[in-house]
Image (cartoon, rainbow, N blue to C red):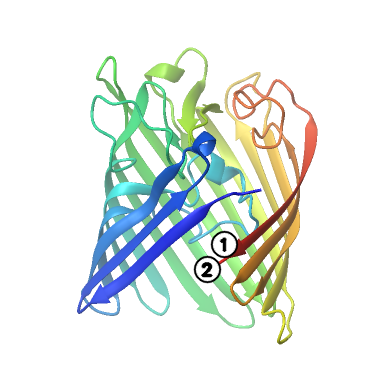
Amino acid sequence: MYDVFRLNVDGAYRKLLFHAEYRFYSESSGGGMLKSGWIGYKFNDKNQLRFGQTTVPFGIQPYQSNSYFFNINYYIGLEDDDDFGISYQYVTKYWQFNAAFFKNSDLLNGEGSVVSGRRYSYDLAGRSKETNTLSGRVAYKGESDVKYEVGISGFVGNSYNIDSRNNDKRLAYAMHIVLDWKNWNLKTQVTYFDYGCEESKEDGYVSMVAFNAPYQVADKGQTYSACLSYTVPFVNKLVDNIKFYNDYSYMHKAKKGFNDSYMNVVGCSVSTGPVYIYADVVAAKNQPWISPDWENSFATGADNKWHTRLNLNVGYYF
């Protein structure tokens, strides 16, 4: 079944950098949408500035997970997220510093308009929207027998209510550790988030949207993720790479009476030339993409049962 067609453009002219990624999904999943698009300036090998719809520097980069389904953080706007603003990065052999300011969650997000569902990254929706967000990330890389990365990150910004025109504070922060030993890789992250706003004061949840399909998310909580992978060490004319993985994530919801969410993905990815394949088995409790209750799984979690889904995704890159 058709999933997505995407166009990527990358270029450079002297010290100017260009990047854009546009995706075409079915109309029921949002249709065409800009995932990311920015213009950058490379001061030197260590310093770079970007302006446009660019990556939010939060948590493990570029991905906290290995599978096609990511982990819970993606579905609440805390992984692989791109917003509209300006970002700066400074990278050395051991250190990486990122700082960013995001005016809105996308290019078309005006003050009085409702957030469009035609988006890849999950953002606040309904009568609230993300504005004026400051984000920062610091990571240190080292190696002995084991390569490692240790980092902290966070953001603070506003939740703007379209009706009252009031701003509430929204924030998140995280600590992460990444370990590489031979062909093994382990990514771990602990995250705290607080999306509390005018809309969530009574019910304890906010609305978030991507792919034109909104749902409710607990407005406060913590997530924990541990993603382990093993890359098969061989060289073959037919297959370039095989990676086996297990991605586990858990969301504890702060509001009393809400049932927590769990997600575990076991699978492998195979790359051969321009073809990339994911084969996953997903088991989850109170996860809208897997559970039968789409709207409330990440909020009240009324179903509170384990469900399983098999997935095979084949991508051709040219």
- Could you tell me which residue is drawn at 74 percent across and 77 percent down? 232
Kind of residue at disc 2: Glu
User: Mark 2 near mark 1, Cβ–Cβ under 8 Å?
Assistant: yes
Please state if 243 lies on the left or on the right of 95 as rendered. right
Out of 92 and 1, give the one closest to the viewer. 1
Residue 73 at what x, y percent from top left? 55, 45
What residue lies at 51% left-to-right and 22% top-to-bottom? 205
Q: Position of residue 66 (x, y in %)?
A: 63, 60
Across and down, in percent, residue 141 comes to: 48, 73
Q: Residues within 10 Å of mark 2 (few under 14, many from 20)?
A: some
Circle 1 SS class: strand
- Residue 197 lies in what quarter of the image? top left
The residue lying at 72 percent from left, 27 percent from top is 292
Q: Which residue is mark 1?
A: 177
Which labelled disc corresponds to residue 149?
2
Identified by mark 1, the residue type is Ile
For the point 52% across and 68% down, which residue is it? Answer: 149
Q: Residue furthest top?
A: 202
Among numbered discs 2 and 1, the one appearing first in the sequence: 2
Residue toward you, 152 or 118: 118
The crowding category of the residue bearing disc 1, from other C-alpha atoms within 10 Å (few below 14, some 14 to 19, many at least 20), is many
Mark 2 and mark 1: span between their CA atoms? 6 Å
* One can see residue 55 in this view: no
Residue 276 visible in the shown view: yes
The quadrant where residue 250 appears: top right
